[in-house]
Image (cartoon, grey):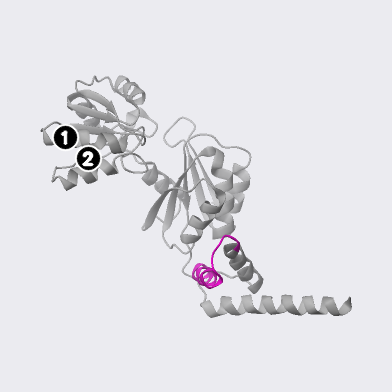
Amino acid sequence: MLAGTPIGDVADAPPRLAAELATADVVAAEDTRRLRRLTQALGVQTTGRVVSYFEGNESARTPELVEALEDGKRVLLVTDAGMPSVSDPGYRLVAAAVEKDIKVTAVPGPSAVLTALALSGLPVDRFCFEGFLPRKGGERLSKLREVAGERRTMVFFEAPHRLDDTLAAMAEVFGDERRAAVCRELTKTYEEVKRGPLKALAEWAAEGVRGEITVVVEGASDAPRNLDPAELVRLVQVREEAGERRKEAIAAVAAEAGLPKREVFDAVVAAKNAARTGSAQGKGLS
């Protein structure tokens, strides 16, 4: 059984959580110390065996937990905050249990993804969750370019010390004026939701931000972006410098801007010809 845990305020714990913690034969916790603090706050005592289950030992411990399930034991999986499997351990265990035809169920609980979406002020009828972006700048830009044309509202997790770089990269790829919301310390004492264009949010984050961060970004508009040829050429060049072939870069920029590929191609060719003409004229003058 998967069990959602509070993302901040312990009072948000679902009523079933305490009962399941008290009666499970095995409690697998991402951090056993945090589990201890949670049970103390809920006023419950675990009677079953408590084991750690985190990224570093997830692969090795999964067979052990599946064996317990096959023996008829009730296994409860909790993570530090929110629902297991959502950017947290859990997927491997669920997949392994399903493969063995073992019933898997859940105690629904708080979710930073859904809470941030609800508070963002952005469309929530269709959305996608992208988790954490790559830490390295080049890889982060590449990933953002992959989703640049995404029409659904996007949700990301990010570490506070990387937030300003991430928002700046989003502004570069998605456009300075793309709307977004930075949700910090959700349900906690210092909860804050900062809304605005990506460029403005990046400037705000450069001053330093603390806490657990969820970023919600507006999806790409169905309407074509009003980009002049020079900006189209710049976007293609950014992608080429990151390692994309020109043909792929042109196609991606066209999709992001909602324009025919031919229009972007023509802008690139015109810029290239202009550069050659300028270079030739410069040589003639010398």
- Magenta residues? 241-257
In reply to whether residue 188 is colored magenta, the answer given is no
Of labels 1 and 2, the one closer to you: 1
Q: Closest to the observer: 113 or 72?
A: 72
Q: Is residue 245 magenta?
A: yes
Q: Quadrant of residue 228?
A: bottom right
x then y, percent, for residue 194: 53, 44
Badge number at residue 67: 1
The N terminus sits in image quarter: top left
Q: Which residue is mark 2?
A: 106
Q: Which mark is residue 46?
A: none
Characterize the magenta stretch by its predominant secondary structure: helix
Which of these two is toward me, 49 or 115? 49
Q: Amino acid at mark 1?
A: Glu
Q: Secondary structure at mark 1?
A: helix
Q: Position of residue 130 (x, y in %)?
A: 41, 51
Residue at the spot 37% in from the left edge and 46% down from the top edge = 114
Residue count near mark 2 (Cα–Cα under 10 Å), binned few <14, some 14–19, many ≥20: some
| Coordinates of residue 71 in the picture (x, y in percent) | 11, 33
Question: On the image, which quarter does residue 84 sit in?
Answer: top left
Q: Residue at x 31, y 42 (%)?
A: 85
- Amino acid carrying label 2: it is Ala
Question: Tag count in the figure?
Answer: 2
